[in-house]
Amino acid sequence: MSSHRVTGAAAGQDHPATLSPAEARALFRDGLDTPTAGWSRGFTQANLIIVPRAHAFDVLLFAQRNPKSCPILGVLDAGETSGPLLAGGDIRTDLPRYTVYQDGVLVAEPGDITDWWRDDLVTFVIGCSFTFETALQDAGVPIAHIEQGVNVPMYRTNVRSASAGALSGPMVVSMRPIPADRVAEAVRITARYPAVHGAPVHVGDPSVLGIADLMDPDFGDAVEIGEGDVAVFWACGVTPQAAVMESRPSLAIGHAPGFMLITDARDSDYRVP
Amino acid sequence: MSSHRVTGAAAGQDHPATLSPAEARALFRDGLDTPTAGWSRGFTQANLIIVPRAHAFDVLLFAQRNPKSCPILGVLDAGETSGPLLAGGDIRTDLPRYTVYQDGVLVAEPGDITDWWRDDLVTFVIGCSFTFETALQDAGVPIAHIEQGVNVPMYRTNVRSASAGALSGPMVVSMRPIPADRVAEAVRITARYPAVHGAPVHVGDPSVLGIADLMDPDFGDAVEIGEGDVAVFWACGVTPQAAVMESRPSLAIGHAPGFMLITDARDSDYRVP
């Protein structure tokens, strides 16, 4: 690691919001292991799913049929390790932490996946709701899990995703408690970001989605729900990951939750008029 | 053919705009061979591409990378012949005319493809600009090729599509001359239909796209361009068909130009807020 990079790393940990995506990826490539929330503000963070070519059509078809939970931002060809979303980068090293599944079983959470790489691996880059959270905050809509310093709560629902080949599973949703008088604003703003989950899939009663207890999420952390807040639910990028893992491919690689790919795309690239 | 259907066919040819999609498809299934422009007004017409499963990932990836020219409305699984876009229908019989390519060579233009069907064939249903033409007309924007009673003119451009596996080729565009004071309105309206090609890709000088002569289109018919009209270009659904045919799969099936699939989806389903 050069002294320049050491300086960069120190600065990055102090002011990660101001780092360029390339600077952030270089730090992770050099071994920094940290969640990416708040990094490279204004640039799009993304979920990662990597599968062998033999499973790639099913993943892409699952995404086509479930665009709200599985918005594809980019696909790298089999064996390809870089692309326009991470110019000059390497998908095998440039995330802070990965998850490696063999036959559906988590076998490692490494900081790079060079040892697992194969020339038949196809990489899918999938939109993440971090993008619209910035827009919500800019409009003064409070985001409870950010204010409370925890991960967003996520829940399996009783709604089935549209299946595709070997892939099926429940829709997973994230939940944000929104003050009743800001719900319409939250819907309006997030609807403008269809590439990163878009408008909510459900507003209000969680039991309709088969969620028994909001304080017991299936993934992430519970958040306190304020007096007068309404539970608002968005389709979640965990949906396709769960479906892929359940289909038990010989190898599948994802990002560790919260340890995202920081892309060169700007959040505003994904806003529709 | 029942006497009811004979009556329906006669009525359909008189008033095709008022037929339901299922009624229209039944007429085509029974052998009616006619272009579909103006049929089942308000319902979405679509392009068709059918390829063997071995080529399906490339087609879906080409679509993901070229969303303006190749907007996917639906995909039928390998061997599947019906789906929600054509409820109760059969993709092998319900279009008025098909094109069948073997090794990239057109070998037939049949009224049904039952004889060519294989259980490994995957059907892609792709958006068509007929949808936004209705919206333009509703706003009083004139559509020259409809007023002149000809097919829309289409041109190969010097813009390359993003390639995907074996698929590559030029972007093909359709052109509509629009009065200068309505161009902004035409952009605004079509931008609201991203699933059916969306906003124009180019406004004005055709030479920038490598088009030497607007009166000599590569597909469709030339249209007269009025004094004060501006040439406006939209990405065209011929783009993916051309790329698929050029890759010379053992078998590929499309619709004959203008002889579209009439789906059960409504044009308004594809309008964004």
Image (cartoon, coloured by chain):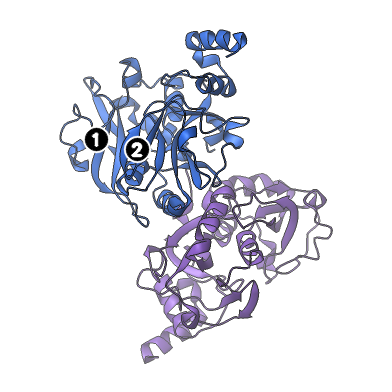
Chain colours: A purple, B blue
Could you tell whether A210 is left or right of B16 in the image?
right
Q: Looking at the picture, tell me which residue is in the foreground, B89 or A186.
A: B89
Could you tell whether A263 is left or right of A106 in the image?
left
* Spot occupied by residue B244 in the image (x, y as percentages of width and height): 36, 46
Q: Chain of mark 1?
A: B
Q: Chain of mark 2?
A: B
Q: Is residue B158 above or below residue B230?
A: below
Say which residue label 1 marks.
B204
Instruction: Look at the numbered disc 1 and give the secondary structure of its residue.
Output: loop
Q: Is residue A193 visible?
A: no
Q: Are marks 2 and 1 on the same chain?
A: yes
Report the amino acid beneath label 1.
Gly
Say which residue label 2 marks.
B238
Q: Looking at the picture, tell me which residue is in the foreground, B231 or B259.
A: B259
Could you tell whether B138 is left or right of A170 in the image?
left
* Spot occupied by residue B252 in the image (x, y as percentages of width and height): 40, 42
Residue B21 picture quarter: top right
Q: Quadrant of the N terminus of chain A?
A: bottom left
Instruction: Look at the numbered disc 2 and give the secondary structure of its residue.
Output: helix
* Spot occupied by residue B117 in the image (x, y as percentages of width and height): 49, 39
